[in-house]
Amino acid sequence: METPFGLGALPTLSRSTADRQESLRTNPDRLAERWPNARIVLLDEHARTPVVEGSGTLATRKSQEFGTAPPAEAVFLGEWQGTDYWSMPGRPAGETETVEMAGSWGVIEQVARHEGEIWVDLRGYGDLLDDTSAGLFTTAQALQAWRRQAKFCTRCGSLTELIQLGWASKCTGCGREEYPRTDPAVICLVHDDAGVNGEHVLLARQPIWPPDRYSILAGFVEAGESLEGCVEREIREEVGVEVRDVRYLGSQPWPFPRSIMLGFTARADISSTIVPAEGEIEEAFWVSREEVRAAFANSQLRNAGAVPTPIAGGTRQLVLPGNSSIARVMLAAWAGV
């Protein structure tokens, strides 16, 4: 008997092992005592971090390289297996060479290499990291992005300063405290009414995406709106289709710059007229499970350097979301690959 599909796998950026509970970062004596043995995750101005080349492990630094006590710009990320981890701004310590690697959406990107390390971004490399590294990198980027957008008080406009080891800010003028924001966004896999899980899925592309790139539909939750209501509204706004039987699947942090993606699935009538939202959706159409499976097979060919084949014998190339996205996990679960 067919059962409703689930995620099947944990989204890559949802993986984490470090303990970052508040009691750890509000205990300065403990943190100061453990600082000499701590490890540092570096982030450059483009939110790239060094990874040991050919591995899924962050190339962290010894804390002693940055002084005998945590510097003001250090942010506590958590503790794992007896070691404290922090993040700090940093760059390669010397001249770099440029190498190419597959990045987001499978597009070839140029990255810096220095002394056995490559400086990578989270969106393109996150799925290749081990669980601990993925969690540390995701947290570090989320806090860095928040800090860049929270330098001034939203009440009086004065400069803010970091407190709680990077997990809060305090206004130097009025004393107002603020904490890292996370904007909820829904992402929904819409399938048809055939059977329990349908036989077709609704895919779309935004005008700004690379050619042939398609994904499922997503949008931000508005003030005073439920998650289910957001799913129904966003699908209606973006492609003019009414959905029902909205069901939650799972979530993933998406710090680009500060979102959490809440994954849902819903059903819709495949005969519904699709009306792409002008300026937001360039194209949308129903795709069969066989086509989605073929697209996943083609992504493996691209990663191996081979030429992909047109989907279903036609001319369309269907490039699915990158491995770091929950959208890919949802599509793989639905397609059974």
Image (tube, grey):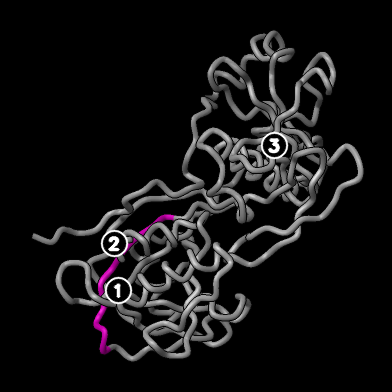
Q: Is residue 299 found left or right of 88 in the rendered image? A: left
Q: Earlier in the sequence, mark 2 or mark 3?
A: 3
Q: Is residue 138 found left or right of 251 in the rendered image? A: right
Name the residue tied to disc 3. 176
The crowding category of the residue bearing disc 2, from other C-alpha atoms within 10 Å (few below 14, some 14 to 19, many at least 20), is few
Q: Quadrant of residue 240?
A: bottom left
The crowding category of the residue bearing disc 3, from other C-alpha atoms within 10 Å (few below 14, some 14 to 19, many at least 20), is some
Residue drawn where x is 54% and y is 75% of the image: 307
Task: Kindly identify the amino acid type of the residue bearing the numbered disc 1.
Answer: Arg
Distance between mark 2 and mark 3 Cα atoms: 50 Å
Instruction: Quarter of the image for the C terminus: give it.
Output: bottom left
Distance between mark 2 and mark 1 Cα atoms: 9 Å
Q: Is residue 292 above or below residue 279?
A: above
Indicate whether residue 270 is drawn in magenta. yes
Instruction: Quarter of the image for the N terminus: give it.
Output: bottom left
Name the residue tied to disc 2. 336
Q: Please say if the residues under marks 2 and 1 sit with CB atoms less than 8 Å apart.
A: yes
Name the residue tied to disc 1. 289
Residue drawn where x is 55% and y is 63% of the image: 304
Residue at the farthest right position: 95
Task: Return the x and y of residue 293 as percentages of the image width and height.
Answer: 35, 70
Q: Earlier in the sequence, mark 1 or mark 3?
A: 3
The stretch in magenta equals: 262-271
Task: Return the x and y of residue 306 as percentages of the image width and height.
Answer: 55, 70
Distance between mark 1 and mark 3 Cα atoms: 52 Å
Residue drawn where x is 21% and y is 67% of the image: 197
From the viewer's perspective, is the residue at label 2 or at label 3 nearer? 2
Task: Kindly identify the amino acid type of the residue bearing the numbered disc 2.
Answer: Gly
Residue 114 visible somewhere in the drawing: yes
Q: Main secondary structure of the magenta part?
A: strand
For the residue labelled by badge 3, is the local secondary structure a helix, a strand or a loop?
loop
